[in-house]
Image (cartoon, helix red, strand yellow):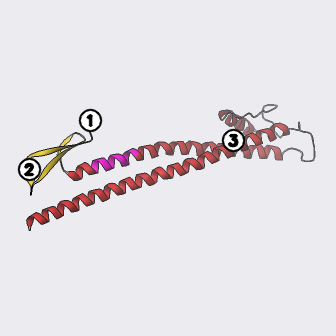
């Protein structure tokens, strides 16, 4: 792997006894100190940005899962509301609803069991069990999502700090070069 920055002494180049250097930056020779510092600083910033972008995709997938599980809970609540509330029969069935079939597919996608009867109906017992399981999975995923969002914010802060640091270092190098040139001219 090639070196990012390689200093090279300029033959016979000294100013007031101080050796002068040239830099090879990312394979390009005869670069100045500012270019070398900028390359290193921005390379770090880009690496952090890349990590943040990948982590953002993880957060998006978790958000999608939380949203889909929330939709399943809504379908289950609707199904339970169609059952006779006064009956103590746990085998009572909901009205038929194609949304239950979609909810079952979503549950299967996330490893949660949802048992239907008669194709698109659910018993009270199965609805309560599924509701508890989906709520647990939703709470667990939401907690993980919150932790991932905190981590993502940390990446974004690190990225912003890296860009800011790169900018400050470049400004400082440019000011030092200007002062040196002004001092030599006097």
Q: CA distance from mark 3 to mark 1?
A: 48 Å
Question: Looking at the rendered structure, which numbered label has been put on residue 68?
Answer: none
Q: Nearer the viewer, mark 1 or mark 2?
A: 2
* Res. 47 image quadrant: top left
Q: Is residue 163 above or below residue 69?
A: below
Q: Is residue 26 above or below residue 186?
A: above
Question: Looking at the rendered structure, which numbered label has been put on residue 137?
Answer: 3
Q: Is residue 34 magenta?
A: no
The residue at the point 84 percent across, 38 percent down is: 125
Q: CA distance from mark 1 to mark 2?
A: 26 Å
Q: Nearer the viewer, residue 162 or 129?
A: 162
Coordinates of residue 95 in the picture (x, y in percent): 83, 40
Q: Is residue 43 above or below residue 17?
A: above
174 left or right, relative to 97:
left
Taking the image as drawn, is residue 123 in sight? no
The residue at the point 89 percent across, 47 percent down is: 85
The residue at the point 34 percent across, 56 percent down is: 165
Secondary structure at badge 3 equals helix
* Res. 114 image quadrant: top right
Q: Are marks 3 and 2 in contact (CB under 8 Å)?
A: no
Which region of the structure is painted magenta? 38-47
Residue on which the image places disc 1: 2
Q: Quadrant of the C terminus?
A: bottom left
Q: Is residue 182 above or below residue 27?
A: below
Q: Are marks 3 and 1 in contact (CB under 8 Å)?
A: no
Q: Nearer the viewer, residue 46 or 67?
A: 46
Residue on which the image places disc 2: 13
Q: CA distance from mark 3 to mark 2?
A: 68 Å
């Amino acid at each position: 792997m090639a070196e990012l920055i390689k200093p090279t002494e300029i033959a016979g180049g000294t100013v007031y006894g101080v050796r002068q250097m040239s830099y090879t930056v990312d394979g390009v020779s005869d670069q100045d100190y500012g270019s070398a510092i900028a390359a290193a600083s921005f390379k770090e910033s880009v690496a952090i940005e890349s990590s943040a972008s990948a982590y953002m995709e993880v957060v998006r997938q978790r958000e999608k899962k939380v949203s889909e599980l929330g939709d399943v809970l809504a379908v289950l609540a609707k199904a339970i509301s169609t059952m006779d509330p006064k009956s103590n029969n746990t085998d009572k069935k909901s009205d038929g609803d194609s949304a239950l079939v979609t909810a079952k597919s979503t549950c299967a996608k996330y490893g949660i069991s949802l048992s239907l009867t008669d194709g698109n109906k659910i018993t009270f017992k199965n609805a309560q069990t599924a509701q508890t399981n989906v709520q647990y999975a939703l709470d667990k995923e939401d907690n993980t999502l919150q932790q991932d969002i905190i981590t993502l914010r940390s990446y974004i802060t690190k990225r912003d700090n890296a860009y800011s640091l790169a900018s400050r270092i470049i400004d400082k190098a440019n000011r030092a070069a200007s002062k040196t040139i002004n001092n030599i001219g006097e």
